[in-house]
């Protein structure tokens, strides 16, 4: 698919069917995350595939925004591996995990799968439920699956600000 068309067609799916995801498709989604650029190519992303009934039940303890997807990806980063900016110590792990998540979302769309980026979760509960070591920082949840027959886009999905409102040349003037 042409990239701009892919970006236009992707939307946050909030109603999933129970159709299982083929391993080949999951593998391609995970590969897209593996190929994502990260600061200094340190690749601090750590992805937990949440797919069995017990793990999905745990996920429901951590967020109401699971949308009953048949699978979810928990995208984290390892703070012992992530690059830190020398000027102020800014940890790039959250940025790297976000790039990874974006690439996986777009790959899923290209494969006919739906996703929605979930940032509304209790990180302490996630850490507890999934036994994450203290160096692993959860950033995003990505419910993943096929669209339910009656799923629809959010009415605001296609509403975008003009390019003049979001892009500035040489200085901020608005």
Image: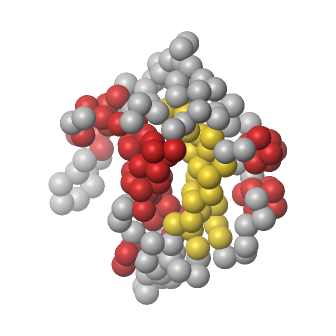
Residue 112 or 121: which is nearer the viewer? 112
Q: Quadrant of residue 3?
A: top left
Residue 17 or 92: which is nearer the viewer? 17
In the image, is residue 53 above or below residue 152? below
Q: Quadrant of residue 135?
A: bottom right
In the image, is residue 54 above or below residue 9? below
Q: Quadrant of the N terminus?
A: top left
Q: Position of residue 141 (x, y in %)?
A: 61, 48
Q: Residue at x 43, y 77 (%)?
A: 42
In the picture as drawn, the residue positioned furthest to the left comes out as 169
Q: Quadrant of residue 36?
A: bottom left
Q: Position of residue 126 (x, y in %)?
A: 75, 56
Residue 162 in view of the camera? no
Q: Position of residue 123 (x, y in %)?
A: 72, 57
Left/right placement of residue 134 relative to residue 114 reads right
Residue 111 or 9: which is nearer the viewer? 111
Residue 83 in view of the camera? yes
In the image, is residue 76 above or below residue 116? below
Residue 71 or 120: which is nearer the viewer? 71
Q: Residue at x 64, y 33 (%)?
A: 69
């Amino acid at each position: 698919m042409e990239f701009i068309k892919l970006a236009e067609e992707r939307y946050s799916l909030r109603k999933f069917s129970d159709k299982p995801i083929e391993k080949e498709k999951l593998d391609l989604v995970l590969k897209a995350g593996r190929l994502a650029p990260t600061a200094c190519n340190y690749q601090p992303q750590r992805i937990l595939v949440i797919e069995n009934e017990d793990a999905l039940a745990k996920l429901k303890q951590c967020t109401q925004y699971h949308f009953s997807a048949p699978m979810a990806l928990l995208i984290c980063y390892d703070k012992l591996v992530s690059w830190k900016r020398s000027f102020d110590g800014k940890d790039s792990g959250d940025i790297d995990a976000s790039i990874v998540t974006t690439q996986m979302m777009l790959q899923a769309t290209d494969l006919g799968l739906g996703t929605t980026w979930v940032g509304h979760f209790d990180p302490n509960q996630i850490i507890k439920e999934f036994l994450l070591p203290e160096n692993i920082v959860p950033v995003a949840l990505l419910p993943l699956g096929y669209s339910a027959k009656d799923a629809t886009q959010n009415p605001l999905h296609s509403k975008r600000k003009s390019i003049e409102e979001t892009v500035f040349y040489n200085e901020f003037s608005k």
